[in-house]
Image (cartoon, rainbow, N blue to C red):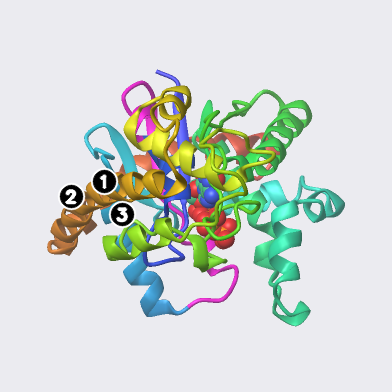
Amino acid sequence: RPRVLSGIQPTADSFHLGNYLGALREWVVMQETHDAFYCVVDLHAITMGHDPELLRRRTRLSAAQLLALGIDPERATLFVQSHVPEHTQLSWVMECLTGFGEAGRMTQFKDKSARQEADHVSVGLFTYPVLQAADILIYQADAVPVGEDQRQHLELTRNLAQRFNSRFGETFTVPAAHIPKETAKIFDLQDPTVKMSKSVPAGVVELLEDPKRSVKKIRSAVTDAGREIQYDPENKPGVSNLLVIYSALTGRSIADLEAAYEGKGYGDLKKELGQTVLEFVTPFQEKVRGYLDDPAELDKVLRRGAEHAREVAAGTLKTVYDRIGFLPPA
Ligand code: AQP
């Protein structure tokens, strides 16, 4: 089976609809067809400053949400990134293959560093995409399900794999980004020209918030001039975003929704989408609570996942160390 790897940061109390529709939904699907490795990337979560207690809590919370969304530890290897030290070991090797200018061109770094005072921008934020490349390459992943915002990081990962292979001999699988067509980028409900993101919390639907809050946020989502419910991202980004979310959650095509809402108003669409979201998150939240009620079992799942992940990661690292000429310990 082809292999898949992806990760999510434990940097918020809740995943949001963008995370779910852009990436996590694919994780669940791909565990059926791929040898899947999914991780909570806690090493990435300390690049912008953090609170240790909160990080610990959010790491468990993230794992619980992944299980509640349908990640099955019998099918997929679910683990915490810091439990597999080989990621950081490979990351150093990859840093030495990455150009300073090349890393500096990463738009996520440019955006995130621009939002912080210069003195507070960490070197870790700068090298973040290189660690991400190591996360992927250490498992020899074929595919990486992510949202559109990760396309550039995936390109860097591919370049690093190819660079290593051509300098030191065929070692890494060159992975492909697996970016869903329709839901590659879910937009903020208050500003449908920017991606839904926990960094700009006003228009974000959080999966663990009180569903009534989500309903309210959807009701007050920014829509567009005119009255027709039509998919037209250029001229009607707000309505188009709602249609994409609605279509993804119900499995109904956009064309079908456009036909169904002919002659109806934005209010109708928002009301029914709110209800759909409520019906989606209510059982999800219940499942999350169930997993959190038994942290020992949750930790056991993560320990087993890390054990398996380490076996694979250690194999790759050994080959890499050998290829680059590190003397093996006697
Ligand atoms: N709005 C989005 N639309 C589609 N996919 C999205 N992803 C994130 N936002 C959207 C995808 O979710 C996965 C996990 O991403 P992450 O761990 O990097 O989470 P994040 O980037 O911290 O989430 P945010 O809210 O986007 O945070 P900031 O503001 O820090 O960038 C990834 O596959 C991502 O593509």
Query: What's the magenta region?
Result: 28-50
**Which residue is denoted by mark 2 in the rendering?**
283
Report crowding for label 2: few under 14, some 14 to 19, many 20 or more residues within 10 A (C-alpha): few
**Which residue is denoted by mark 3 in the rendering?**
63
**Which residue is denoted by mark 1 in the rendering?**
280
Residue at the spot 72% in from the left edge and 61% down from the top edge: 111
Residue 43 in magenta?
yes
Element marked by disc 3: helix
Place of residue 328 in the rendered image (x, y in percent of width and height, measured from the top left):
58, 44
First reached walking from the N terminus: tag 2 or tag 3: 3
Place of residue 142 in the rendered image (x, y in percent of width and height, measured from the top left):
53, 25
Q: How many marks?
A: 3
Q: Nearer the viewer, residue 191 or 21?
A: 191
Mark 1 vs mark 3: give the one in front. 1
Query: Badges 1 and 2: C-beta atoms under 8 Å apart?
Result: yes
C-alpha span from label 1 to label 3? 19 Å
Amino acid type of the residue that numbered disc 3 sits on in the rendered structure? Ala
Residue at the spot 69% in from the left edge and 55% down from the top edge: 108
Residue 151 is marked as none
Looking at the picture, does residue 255 appear above or below residue 220?
above
Residue 30 in magenta?
yes
Q: Nearer the viewer, residue 252 or 151?
A: 252
Query: Badges 2 and 3: C-beta atoms under 8 Å apart?
Result: no
